[in-house]
């Protein structure tokens, strides 16, 4: 995203003169969805390398990663892994994460379902051309057997601690993987990609020293944590966990209380704040309930699958700073709220300003300035004035 350090009347004006008046303060205006680019079939995610102010990278379920530079889509894909993946239902290339030291080490990681449907994390290296990856540099980091077409999870994200967090679905079949500490399905995992080959397990992971529990587990009791995020200002963790029967949920863990370490979010004993299996009389002790839920069939809003988003930390909308944005796959609405003392406050519907997203709303993303993006159908949008 282009930013200006002086009056942005024309881009060719010199910014060096000390006699120019200071730039006017940013004022609040209504947000709108502004099209950045289209023509990206099944685009699922957008992100940016640390410190890169001119480029965004998009992820397509069909296996391509594309570069948007200064709002222009480059013709050559950054990487194409279509030969490695399975694309059906919820399977495919699902996300991308740049190493915090990407500017110096050129490493990035992708999450996809392989030819057998296994959840797979692979590391790659950029080539001498910063807009093209070294396709031959791929090395396997993690492979997790996955029995079903759906509930893959799908997000990789480096946390404020420098560790790589991985969201996995519960397997897409009738299992209790979310509550099974020996399974890496239905979890948020945390690994150290700098400490070993292909990775090390951080000693502070909550399951370390408790065999036969999988030591990579950070938090559990999740059905399909399709998108989660860390607030870049304070490290708080937000998880959008897609529901099964009737309830979509958003989970929250403050950084000050461990950012979700060892938390059990309830699935499949519970769906949201409601008993699921069994339908009544379920055990709620030790479960962390969501901070927000909505139904598929009743109340306002309704929807089919929650799309977890991000806390706005940009500069375009000062009044929105600190608000968590999220949406729904089918209905295409976008809403936001603030969290105060662990509870949702000031829930807002942004339909009047943003409308509803055409096509399927698949993800939110951030650039390095904290501005928010939305992927839907074959298009990438920016929330902008």
Image (cartoon, rainbow, N blue to C red):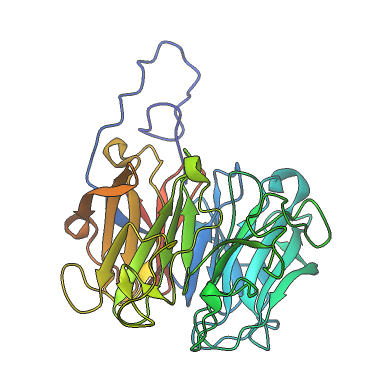
The x and y percentages for residue 45 are: 50, 65
Relative placement, left or right, of 106 versus 169 is right
The x and y percentages for residue 28 are: 24, 37
Q: Is residue 189 above or below residue 277?
A: above
Q: Nearer the viewer, residue 173 or 316?
A: 173
- On the question of residue 232 being in view, the answer is no
Q: Quadrant of residue 196?
A: bottom right
Q: Nearer the viewer, residue 103 or 110?
A: 110
The x and y percentages for residue 127 are: 77, 58
Q: Nearer the viewer, residue 28 or 280?
A: 280
Q: Quadrant of residue 164?
A: bottom right
Relative placement, left or right, of 3 versus 349 is right
The x and y percentages for residue 5 are: 45, 28
All told, the count of numbered labels is 0
Q: Residue at x 44, y 33 (%)?
A: 4
Q: Nearer the viewer, residue 233 or 289?
A: 289
Q: Is residue 209 above or below residue 147?
A: above
Q: Residue furthest top?
A: 19
Relative placement, left or right, of 196 versus 353 is right
Q: Residue at x 26, y 68 (%)?
A: 294
Q: Is residue 88 above or below residue 104?
A: below
């Amino acid at each position: 995203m282009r930013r200006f350090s002086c009056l942005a009347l024309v881009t060719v004006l010199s910014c060096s003169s000390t006699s120019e008046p200071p730039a006017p303060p940013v004022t609040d205006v209504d947000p709108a969805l502004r099209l950045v680019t289209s023509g990206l079939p099944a685009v699922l995610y957008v992100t940016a390398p640390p410190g890169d102010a001119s480029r965004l990278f998009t992820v397509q379920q069909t296996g391509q990663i594309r570069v948007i530079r200064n709002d222009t889509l480059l013709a050559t894909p950054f990487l194409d892994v279509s030969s490695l993946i399975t694309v059906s239902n919820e399977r495919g290339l699902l996300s991308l994460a740049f190493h915090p030291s990407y500017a110096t080490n050129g490493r990035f990681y992708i999450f996809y379902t392989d030819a057998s449907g296994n959840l797979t994390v692979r590391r790659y290296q950029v080539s001498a051309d910063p807009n093209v990856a070294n396709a031959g540099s791929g090395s396997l980091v993690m492979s997790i057997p996955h029995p079903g077409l759906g509930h893959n999870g799908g997000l990789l994200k480096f946390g404020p601690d420098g560790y790589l967090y991985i969201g996995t679905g519960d397997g897409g079949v009738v299992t209790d993987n979310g509550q099974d500490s020996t399974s890496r399905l239905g979890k948020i995992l945390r690994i150290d990609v700098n400490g070993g080959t292909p990775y090390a397990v951080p000693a502070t992971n909550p399951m370390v020293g408790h065999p036969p529990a999988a030591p990579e587990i950070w938090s559990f009791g999740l059905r399909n944590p399709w998108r989660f995020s860390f607030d870049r200002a304070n490290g708080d963790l937000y998880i959008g966990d897609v529901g099964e029967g009737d309830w979509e949920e958003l989970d929250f863990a403050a950084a000050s209380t461990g950012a979700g370490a060892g938390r059990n979010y309830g699935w499949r004993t519970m769906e949201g704040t409601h008993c699921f299996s069994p339908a009544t009389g379920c055990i709620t002790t030790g479960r962390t309930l969501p901070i927000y839920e909505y139904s598929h069939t009743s109340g306002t809003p309704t929807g089919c699958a929650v799309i977890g988003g991000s806390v706005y930390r940009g500069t375009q909308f000062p009044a929105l700073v600190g608000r968590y944005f999220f949406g729904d796959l089918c209905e295409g609405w976008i809403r936001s709220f603030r969290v105060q003392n662990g509870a949702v406050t000031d829930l807002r519907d942004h339909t009047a300003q943003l409308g509803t997203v055409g096509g399927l709303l698949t993800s939110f993303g951030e650039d390095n300035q904290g501005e928010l993006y939305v992927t839907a159908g074959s298009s990438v949008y920016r929330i902008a004035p």
